[in-house]
Amino acid sequence: MSILIENISKHFGQFQALSPLSLDINEGEMIGLLGPSGSGKTTLLRIIAGLEGADTGRIQFGDRDVTNLHVRDRRVGFVFQNYALFRHMTVADNVAFGLEVLPRKERPSPTEIKNRVMHLLEMVQLEHLASRFPSQLSGGQKQRIALARALATQPEVLLLDEPFGALDAKVRKELRRWLRGLHDELGFTSVFVTHDQEEALELSDRVVVMSNGHIEQIDQPGALYASPNSRFVFDFLGNANVFEGKLENGKWQNLQANIVLPNGAEQKDGQLYIRSHEFFVSKEATAQANLPLRVIAINPIGAEVRLELTPIDWHSNDVWEIDLPHKAFDKNCFEKGQTLYVTPKAGYFFAHDAQQPVLLNWETEKVQVTEQA
Amino acid sequence: MATHLSAAATRPRHKRVLPGLSLSLGTSLLFISLILLLPMSGLVMQSVDMGWDRYWQVISDERVVASYKVTLWAALIASIFNGFFGLLLAWVLVRYEFPGRRILDALVDLPFALPTAVAGITLATLYAQNGWYGEILESLGLKVAYTPWGIVLAMAFTSIPFVVRTVQPVLEELSPEEEEAGMTLGASDWSVFRRVIFPALWPALMTGIALSFTRSLGEFGAVIFIAGNMPYVSEITSLMIFVSLQEFDFPAASAIASVVLIASLILLFAINIWQARYLRRLHGRS
């Protein structure tokens, strides 16, 4: 079922949790609401579910206006962050709950309920735990039971609040894949809340990035990564280093450091966002850039080595992070405390007065020539 | 080898904050013996002295049996009333923010703090024929003071904190998410209460009611001022003990007291065992 959200806003006391926002969700889509805590993503999810009432606006499921419909009549599946399983009921009773409370006319017979519950437990691969109590389950198992319970009444909309927040990394990855499989198989529309960008990018058809009760950007994961449209999205999607530059003689200058403006760059002051893998590293300054940095930590992570660096004789608010392939790292044998120079290959430039970034590319062949010289 | 030994000798033994089991258990047992077991065995000794026939005669005396009935019925009604009202009060205190909530919260303990005789006299004055409430009730044809209903009233007043204070922490711990989960699954408000909230509160509520009941069985001070103490009608068991004492018939007093004691103990044990079973399910220690 498609979901239409129109001009929804919400405040708690003085705090504006959601500024009027609109969102169109297609049938069968999986949407990730991504943002830091306090960005209003959970409030939005609860408003869609009907657990919270919006101050203004309208919500529609398919052709049905549900704005003033009570949560119990909206027929959505909701999975809570802490699972909220009923502690005094067995796993089977938990899953059966949604069927047991149906009005008598709609309620299936006890044997039918039993069969449906067993089928759901098979689907989440936990049929052997039917007679256990929630306190005897692991976090991952609880999460699956919570999902089975939410799906028991065959809702067309499934809402999940930080579904994998409390799980360890390995279980999280497994469950993520499993949920995606389930979604594709059963075809419900899902909206989930997360603060984990990796989760949002991996799981969603479209990601909604939120901050301070606004929607910052709505895009497919690939597009979102390739063209973040604001500083916030850039910061939040992470792994970007920021160079604050003042325009002087065709260079962006920051105290002793500078970067040469590439072709097509605006002649303005601004901030240059450079992702951690978009760097060329050398032991000397290059013709394109003079960015001296000191290595403070070296962390081998998977296919890459991550260097943490602090600026030398220029200013940056954060520690810089640079990812190098093992090959490049081994060739240079960097050590802690050593000074090195980086040159950006590509970056996003936000002029001071601009909201939107401009993608810039430096000609990397040239860099290498300079280094050989 | 030598280093091994010295390492073992200096290895710190205490892993807990309080001193070890022997000291803490010893102290607790000594204290329980002095405060609880010694007086209780004195009670038993007194009753044993009098022989089985006499014992039976005392505890099955018609007037005493009537007092059991009055006490049990009054305590039962009072504790069930407290079960409802205490749950309501705890609910209001936990779930709502309103001006004066903290004062109300503190007031709940008042029956504990007040000397029970003061409570009894106050209640008797209020509900007497010419008292504030008594006048109104009189015009409706209801009589509370100096009837068994007065006993119920006094018992309910003195034991309400037991229910509130046992239910309150459990309610506080109950996550609103479970209720919300019930609602998203389509359950009506009544269904959510019956199937989700109540089962979680049930053990605490039962404990509260049982405590309130046993407290009411033994209540004396508050009750005698309002009960009217008419033989066979509104005499409570603890009054029978008091009467025996005043007649310097200590064995008879002990005999009746032992009946109250045994009844309370059996009830408390039963509740404890039942609750332990129930809680084991909730917390998964099986």
Image (cartoon, coloured by chain):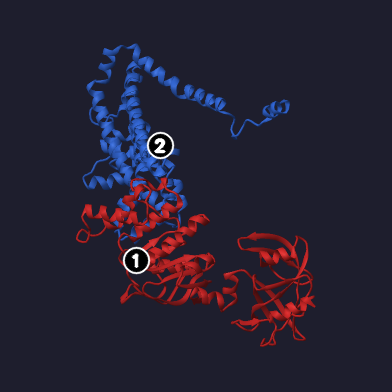
Nearer the viewer's eye, disc 2 or disc 1? 1
Q: Is residue A228 visible?
A: no
Q: Chain of mark 2?
A: B
Q: Quadrant of the N terminus of chain A?
A: bottom left
The colour of chain A is red
Horizontal side of A16 relative to A106 (left or right) equals right
Residue A312 picture location, percent across and down: 78, 69
Residue where numbered disc 1 is placed: A186
Q: Chain of mark 1?
A: A
Q: How many marks?
A: 2
Horizontal side of B218 relative to A362 (left or right) equals left
Residue A7 picture location, percent across and down: 43, 78
Q: Quadrant of residue A261?
A: bottom right
Horizontal side of B195 relative to B114 (left or right) equals left
Q: Nearer the viewer, residue A332 or B260?
A: A332
Residue where numbered disc 2 is placed: B118
Chain letter for the part of the structure drawn in blue: B
Q: Residue at x 56, y 77 (%)?
A: A226
Q: Residue furthest left?
A: A105
Label 2, secondary structure: give it.
Answer: helix
Residue A64 picture location, percent across and down: 30, 75
Residue B226 picture location, percent across and down: 32, 35
Q: Which mark is residue B99?
A: none
Q: Quadrant of residue A341?
A: bottom right
